[in-house]
Image (spheres, rainbow, N blue to C red):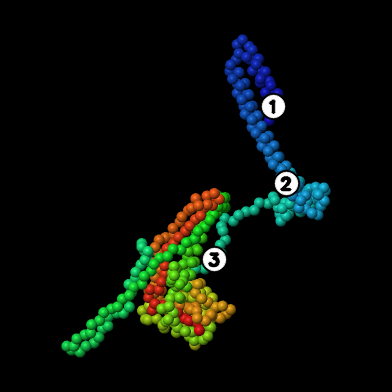
Amino acid sequence: MSDLGTIHEAVKELRDEFDKKSPNFEKIEKIEKDLDAQEVKNQEVVAELKAKEQSALELKERVDSLEAELSRDNKTYDEKNYKDSPEYKALHQFVTKGIDYLEMEQKQLLRTDIDTSGGFLVPTEMDNAITKKITEISNVRSVARVRTISSKSLDIPVRDTILAATYEGEAEEDQLSTSTYSSETLTAFRCSVTVPITMDMLMDAAFNMESEIMGDAAESFAQKEGQKFVTGTGFKEPSGFTTDTRVQAGALDAGNSLTIDADDIILLSGELKVGYNPTYTFNRATMAFIRTLKSTDGQFLWMPGLNGPVMNTINGFPYVLMQDMPGQVADVFVSDTFPVAFGDFLRGYTIVDRTGMNVVRDEFTMKRKAIIEFTLNRWNYGQVTLPEAITLLKIQ
């Protein structure tokens, strides 16, 4: 703090100099600069004192609040005598003077798991990442044919039969022949999700909630379309390859009731024409069951791919896990279900996407509640376009 006596002397000297008939202006200027410097110091000291007063006031309010909590929550002491408790004294000493002034016994009385015994003083910390549960998705897109269209529907011409070639003798006529064709029409339907969120959440959350909504919506769309590509009915939604009546009609019946054996898996691979590039599909539980199956010579059907990029195989063919395929219930398979598929999905199943994900941010419908609605849409469809390229194993 500035020396008050020094300031008084400087003021007296300044006045005396002005009273002279011939004042020394250089000296006056120097004295004024000294006084200005002292004034700056005084202002800093005043600001510092105000800050300390404010800090002391906040500390007093905090102590009063803790005292109230102790008097209300600590039932082991009489309300009039709670200040005499060692816990209160330790907490009061810590708040007012710091932990360095506490005795060892007092330090032991402070606890972080009880708010009134010190828990209020321990700040919590938020992780910088949200831990998310796994969403199981039937990744039909990885094996099917995927087309992007600009209109609502896509017509796919299919050649059903080819020309019939014949042999003739010399000077004999050949027979007339024509190929036959049909068409598969795929019409994209809308898949939507609407998410309401308050303005407070958007502004105050520790995470970018708009980005989280977009990511969750994309994951939700992938889960829903994967499910429908496998089991959909085709009515306002994709048609699943396990529910297609044409594919079901050509299914191979399992040899034993309510179970699968190695023969079923091997025989299923013989249902397709030579020339297709087939893949097994089933869910994880069924895969675990199939991994235990052995052929008649004692060799496991499942073989690990240990040589560089070679993948794991079932019966010598690759496989893809699709969690929406039916599986075991109580260690048995359900009758009239199709837990295993084998097919060339690139030829047999087609997916059409009309657009990417469309986002509508509605800030007006619920504006009086400060709620924003995000509506997200996708248009797509999936359908079996070549039934003979896919075959199913049916549980009896």
Report the amino acid beneath label 3: Ile
Sequence-wise, the earlier of marks 3 and 1 is 1
Res. 317 in view: no
> In the displayed image of the protein, which residue is found farthest to the top?
21
**Residue appearing at x 36%, y 72% in the figure:** 184
Comparing marks 3 and 1, which lies closer to the viewer? 3
Distance CA(mark 3)–CA(mark 2): 44 Å
Task: Kindly identify which residue carries mark 2.
Answer: 65
Residue under the point 47% across and 81% down: 393
Q: Name the residue beneath numbered marker 3.
A: 134
Q: Position of residue 118 (x, y in %)?
A: 72, 51
Q: The residue tagged with tag 1: helix, strand or loop?
A: loop
Residue at 42%, 67% (x, y): give it: 381
Residue highlighted by disc 1: 3
Residue projecting furthest to the bottom: 169
The answer to whether residue 207 is above or below residue 230 is above
Q: Residue at x 52, y 52 (%)?
A: 366
| Depth order, front residue of 352/367 | 367
